[in-house]
Image (cartoon, rainbow, N blue to C red):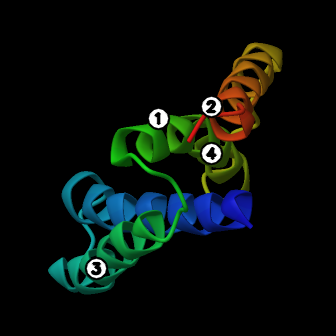
Amino acid sequence: MTYLIYIAAALAEIAGCFSFWAWWRLEKSPLWLIPGLVSLALFGYLLALVETNAAGRAYAAYGGIYIAASLAWLWLVEGVRPDRWDLGGAMLCIVGASVILLAPRGA
């Protein structure tokens, strides 16, 4: 379930940040900022749902998922296909996030 929360959080964060990018860099209407702010609030809420005893650990593990989701956004939304280096780096990040998430921890 944690991975699904992270994926949803990543999509919310990327969409929220992209709304600012679209407004600032692509000269879209300032109205793009409204759903962007809602999306960023949703991101914060979703990340707070992760079951962990430390926020920093949740954020660290999320970072790997975010990188992979960003590359998916690059391909699916921006139309730029990730290369083998992008994919290899994303796999390393997913492995790192999984080590953080799945490591046995004492009470």
- How many C-alpha atoms fall within 10 Å of the one at disc 4: few (<14), some, or many (≥20)? some
Tell me how far mark 3 sits from mark 2, CA to CA: 35 Å
Q: Nearer the viewer, mark 4 or mark 2?
A: 2
Q: Quadrant of the N terminus?
A: bottom right
Q: Earlier in the sequence, mark 2 or mark 1?
A: 1
Q: In the rendered view, does 95 fall on the left or right side of 67?
A: right
Instruction: Name the residue at 71% across, 31% down.
Output: 103
Instruction: Identify residue for label 2.
Output: 100
Tell me how far mark 2 sits from mark 1, CA to CA: 8 Å
- Pick whichever, 60 or 39, lies toward us: 60
Mark 1 residue type: Ala
Q: Are marks 2 and 1 in contact (CB under 8 Å)?
A: yes
Instruction: Name the residue at 30% across, 83% down.
Output: 38
- How many C-alpha atoms fall within 10 Å of the one at disc 3: few (<14), some, or many (≥20)? some
Q: Secondary structure at mark 2?
A: helix
Q: In the rendered view, does 78 fall on the left or right side of 31?
A: right
Q: Are marks 4 and 2 in contact (CB under 8 Å)?
A: no
Q: Quadrant of the C terminus?
A: top right
Q: Secondary structure at mark 3?
A: helix
Mark 2 residue type: Ile
Mark sitting on residue 11: none
Q: Earlier in the sequence, mark 4 or mark 1?
A: 1
How many numbered badges does the structure rendering display? 4
Residue 92 percent coordinates (x, y): 74, 19
- Tell me the quarter of the picture where residue 7 sits: bottom right
Q: Secondary structure at mark 4?
A: helix
Instruction: Identify residue for label 4.
Output: 74
- How many C-alpha atoms fall within 10 Å of the one at disc 2: few (<14), some, or many (≥20)? some
Instruction: Name the residue at 51% across, 37% down.
Output: 63
Instruction: Identify residue for label 1.
Output: 60
